[in-house]
Amino acid sequence: MYSLNTSSDLSPYATTRLLRQPVESTLNTESCLTRLAPMEVRQMLQSRAHSELLKERTGHRLMLVAHRGTGPTSVFGSTFPDRLQPENSLQAIKAAILQGADAIEIDIFKSRDGKVMVTHDDEIWRNAYNADRNGSRLPASETKATYLVGQKTADELRHIPIGPHGETTPMLSEVIALVNDANQTLTRYGKHPIILNIELKDATAVSSMLDLVAEGKGQTDKLTPENIIFCSFKHKALKELKTEAERRGLSGINIAPGIKTADLFGKQNMKEDFSLKDPNATYQNNAMDNLRALVEGNGFQGYDGILWDLRTPIVDLAASGNKAIHASTSDFRQYSDNRDFSLVLLELSKRVETFFKCDNVDDARKVLLESSILLKGVGIQMMHKTLPDGSDSFYLYRPCDEQDNSEILKTGARKAIAYSRLVSA
């Protein structure tokens, strides 16, 4: 389990919003993408200082995890917004680091030549820029059986853009190099290193992935196994991963199996789009027994569930076993328009170590920090809002005594409308 030391000799600066780098700077050499420039180092440290305010208000038990870097973009298909960084790209991962992420979540598959690649989907048409996400328009001579990450070499994947500025699918070794570079600076300033949250999408990648992880064993300047969290819906593969890691002497491996909506509520209570038929549905009778056997029975460290599915029983289960909760979201960026997510996370962090996988660390942190002040503040608070016309608005707020919001865990958070639907509407 993690206990972050967030002491700092920096003042808490307001986080600077990351702007997209010019094309010529983002598409430079590999070393440019896997290292932080001096200006980027300053921005990362300023963002981390801002995060310390949130840590102090949540008992140092709430960590912000950048989901796929800076959030899902493959859901947009051919309508990919130019202003967004492509998910799982080095550019998106660096952007999350500069936003002060406590952890970075990525997905992996193995290429035809055995390289561990960072991508959410094996189907290239789901990742390629300006492609039809259902695969109806494939390049000449390609079929759905050939246009797969597992059918291409790492070099071939380098020639397939996944974003509007020529971004391509990175290798896991490149992501580790970038995280190592950031962590060396964070360590010098007495800050906890960035955690890498690796979602195993390809069961055949276990050995190759552990080869890379093993390079950090006992190394102070490299990503150590203790600072990696593995997750997957492939529970059998996670068991094999743990067994092989232990055989190699890689101690401290952290594993949080993915928990599907069907695991909690039952397939019979789900619609085709994976939403619940009845928003007030409760967990099926054997759900907690099954989860306890999965996590505690295999020595795993936590539960990786969808934020909108989290209810009191799974929180009680995690708390009783001293396990962490990983609360995932996908295609969700409208944080200021949906405060349910912050109520859930603030309640979770009272009881268990909580990792929130969000699409934009900067925006999520601001709303969480403001929500914690509104709910737990003392005295009169000066609050700030940016109005729709871009102007600033300041107002005074006096909170009541600390409010009890535990009811939110009984009913669950109100599920937000997918961001891609809002943008394309």
Image: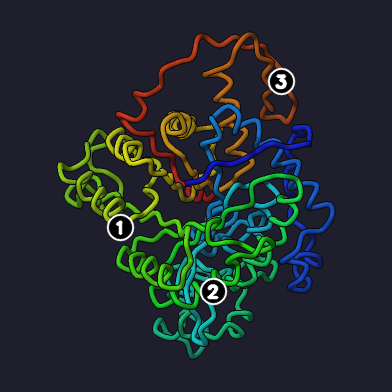
Badge 3 amino acid? Ser
**Tally of numbered tags:** 3
What is the secondary structure assignment of the residue under circle 2? Answer: strand
The label shown at residue 393 is: 3
Q: Do the residues labelled 2 and 3 touch (CB within 8 Å)?
A: no
**Applied colour scheme:** rainbow
Q: Which residue is drawn at 34% across and 70% down?
A: 240
Give the distance between the C-alpha atoms of the residues marked 1 and 2, in whole angstroms: 27 Å
Visible in this render: residue 391? yes
Q: Distance between the residues labelled 2 and 3?
A: 45 Å
> Callout 1 environment at 10 Å: few (<14), some (14 to 19), or many (20+)?
some
Res 258 → quadrant: bottom left
Q: Is residue 169 visible in the rendered structure shown here?
A: no
| Nearest to viewer (mark 1 / mark 2) | 1
Q: Tell me if label 1 and label 3 are in contact, CB under 8 Å.
A: no
Q: Which amino acid does label 1 sit on?
A: Asn
**Which of the marked residues, 2 or 3, is nearer the chain's N terminus?**
2
Please give the name of the residue rendered at 75% of the width and 63% of the height, measured from the top-left corner. Answer: 35
Residue under label 2: 117
The percent position of residue 251, horizontal first and vertical second, equals 47, 62
Of callouts 1 and 2, the N-terminal one: 2
Q: In this view, does 381 lie to the left or right of 125?
A: right
Looking at the image, residue 413 lies above or below residue 177: above
Q: Residue at x 29, y 39 (%)?
A: 317
Q: On the rendered structure, is 3 left or right of 94?
A: left
For disc 1, the marked residue is 298
Q: Is mark 1 on a helix, strand or loop?
A: loop
Give the residue type at disc 2.
Met
> Which callout, 1 or 3, points at the residue further toward the start of the chain?
1
Residue 168 drawn at (x, y percent): 63, 72
Quick check: 302 left or right of 172? left
